[in-house]
């Protein structure tokens, strides 16, 4: 049962599309990402990241479709795609990650991050560092941790910033 607010890492394609006219210089579809990320191969690293920010009791679930997981757990969402979700299940924090995060997904998420952070100096440059799959995964996990740690109502941008401030590299 979901007891707390459930946050989700959404596809940014729709938002990006909507902002395309306003930010035509956003570097869409020019990313150098080629490798998929398989979180299961990095489970100990993921758990270490969560411990580092004080989520020692956080469960890490790796599923084919976080979207399906959300549906099965009665989480309402109106976005067409998620690759990670954080929430409380029976009072316990859970981070749900997609089993295979493709390079296409990574590109779309990073493009959306640039659009969200476009008014903040330096933010787009930080986003480029996430083209490294290891950094991408660390930021993704920290972003979901932010949804569990920051007060309800924290924005995607606030969660992104919180995560950037806690990157190990
Ligand atoms: Zn989020």
Image (cartoon, rainbow, N blue to C red):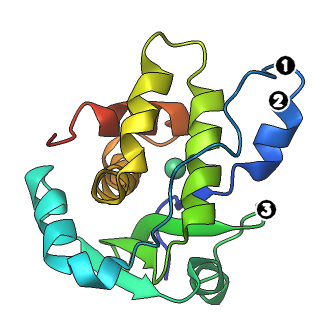
Q: Secondary structure at mark 1?
A: loop
Q: Earlier in the sequence, mark 3 or mark 2?
A: 2
Q: Position of residue 65 (x, y in %)?
A: 59, 84
The local crowd at label 3, few if under 14, some if 14 to 19, many if 20 or more residues have their Cα within 10 Å, is few
**Cβ atoms under marks 2 and 1 closer than 8 Å:** yes
**Cβ atoms under marks 3 and 2 closer than 8 Å:** no
Which residue corresponds to the image point at 64% horizontal and 57% vertical from the top-left?
10
Per the rendering, the mark at residue 19 is 2
Q: Position of residue 93 (x, y in %)?
A: 31, 69
Which residue corresponds to the image point at 34% horizontal and 49% vertical from the top-left?
139
Q: Is residue 155 visible?
A: no
Q: Nearer the viewer, residue 164 or 7?
A: 164
* Residue that numbered label 1 is attached to: 22
* Residue that numbered label 3 is attached to: 78
Picture quadrant of residue 22: top right
Q: CA distance from mark 3 to mark 2?
A: 18 Å
The local crowd at label 1, few if under 14, some if 14 to 19, many if 20 or more residues have their Cα within 10 Å, is few
127 displayed left or right of 52: right
Q: Position of residue 76 (x, y in %)?
A: 71, 69
**Cβ atoms under marks 1 and 3 closer than 8 Å:** no
Check the image and report above or below for 115 versus 142.
Answer: above
């Amino acid at each position: 049962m979901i007891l707390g607010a459930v946050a989700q890492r959404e596809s940014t394609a729709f938002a990006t599309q909507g902002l395309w006219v306003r930010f035509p210089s956003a570097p869409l579809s020019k990313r150098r990402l080629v490798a998929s990320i398989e979180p299961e191969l990095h489970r100990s690293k993921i758990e270490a990241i969560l411990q580092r920010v004080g989520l020692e009791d956080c469960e890490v679930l790796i599923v084919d479709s976080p979207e399906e997981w959300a549906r099965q757990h009665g989480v309402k969402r109106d976005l067409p795609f998620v690759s990670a979700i954080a929430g409380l299940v029976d009072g316990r924090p859970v981070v749900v990650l997609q089993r295979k995060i493709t390079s296409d997904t990574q590109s779309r998420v990073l493009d959306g991050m640039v659009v969200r952070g476009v008014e903040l100096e330096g933010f787009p440059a930080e986003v480029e560092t996430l083209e490294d799959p290891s950094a991408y995964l660390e930021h993704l996990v920290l972003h979901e941790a932010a949804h569990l740690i920051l007060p309800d109502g924290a924005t995607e941008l606030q969660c992104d910033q919180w995560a950037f401030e806690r990157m190990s590299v």
